Image: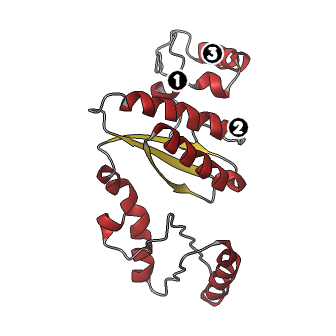
Amino acid sequence: MRQATGLQVPDAARAVLIIEVDGDREFLDKQAQKIVEIIQPLGVVETRIAETPAESEALWQIRRSVSASLRKVNPDKFNEDICVPRSKVPEMIRRIDAISAKHSVAIVNFGHAGDGNIHVNIMIDKKIAGELEKAEQAIEEVFKEALALGGTMSGEHGVGIAKAAYIPLEISEQAAVYMKTIKKALDPNNILNPGKIFLEE
């Protein structure tokens, strides 16, 4: 992000948290100050409060630059969208860091802290032998860790062909039977997205 935007982010910072407040002008400063008081003891490297629309846009530019800057890490991206309870986000990030170190693959995370949605970007170079296999192992472990923390393997993008093989990690065979029964009742000729979820069909 530093390279992509030229924004001055402290070298010690390993993450950026953007908190936006809105409402009546007379309350905004108090809300912002209260937030600073709450987060300051938590090891915050630096705090910035936007005073103008331009300053606000500069902060949001950090978030908007993340996806575009990922190719500077590695050329190939696997973007997963796990979701965990908000209180478990820090623990999930720690577990993702451990997975990254275990498989020697770069993983970049961003998302929506307010609802626990984390975009896990596993960055590899497919031209390097063994990298794809490491990415696949990392993806499965990320899903397992999210589920272990009471989360889900998809909080935003949905489950389709790419995640179909992992469905048994999250739902039981009985639940799958219920889903297939409903699908058959609504689509007896299997003409609506055939083979998009349950690969054996």
Q: Is residue 136 above or below residue 66?
A: above
Residue pointed to by mark 2: 148
Mark nearest the camera among 1 and 3 is 1
Disc assigned to residue 5: none
The 10 Å Cα crowd at callout 2, few under 14, some 14 to 19, many 20 or more, is few
Is label 2 in a helix, a strand or a loop?
A: helix
Residue at image coords 48%, 71%: 12
Is label 1 in a helix, a strand or a loop?
A: helix
Residue at image coords 64%, 26%: 169
In contact (CB < 8 Å): disc 1 and disc 2 = no
Q: Is residue 83 above or below residue 161?
A: below
Residue pointed to by mark 1: 164
Residue 37, given in percent of the width and then of the height, sits at 69, 82
Q: Earlier in the sequence, mark 3 or mark 2?
A: 2
The 10 Å Cα crowd at callout 3, few under 14, some 14 to 19, many 20 or more, is some
Residue pointed to by mark 3: 180
Identity, as a three-letter code, of the amino acid under mark 2: Ala
In contact (CB < 8 Å): disc 3 and disc 2 = no
Compared across the picture, whether 196 is left or right of 66 comes to: right
Q: Quadrant of residue 131?
A: top left
Identity, as a three-letter code, of the amino acid under mark 1: Ala
Residue at image coords 31%, 72%: 6
Q: Quadrant of residue 198?
A: top right
Residue 39, given in percent of the width and then of the height, sits at 66, 74
Q: Is residue 22 above or below residue 173?
A: below
- Report the quarter where the N terminus lies: bottom left
Residue 42, given in percent of the width and then of the height, sits at 67, 72
Q: Earlier in the sequence, mark 1 or mark 2?
A: 2
Front position in the image: 109 or 45:
45
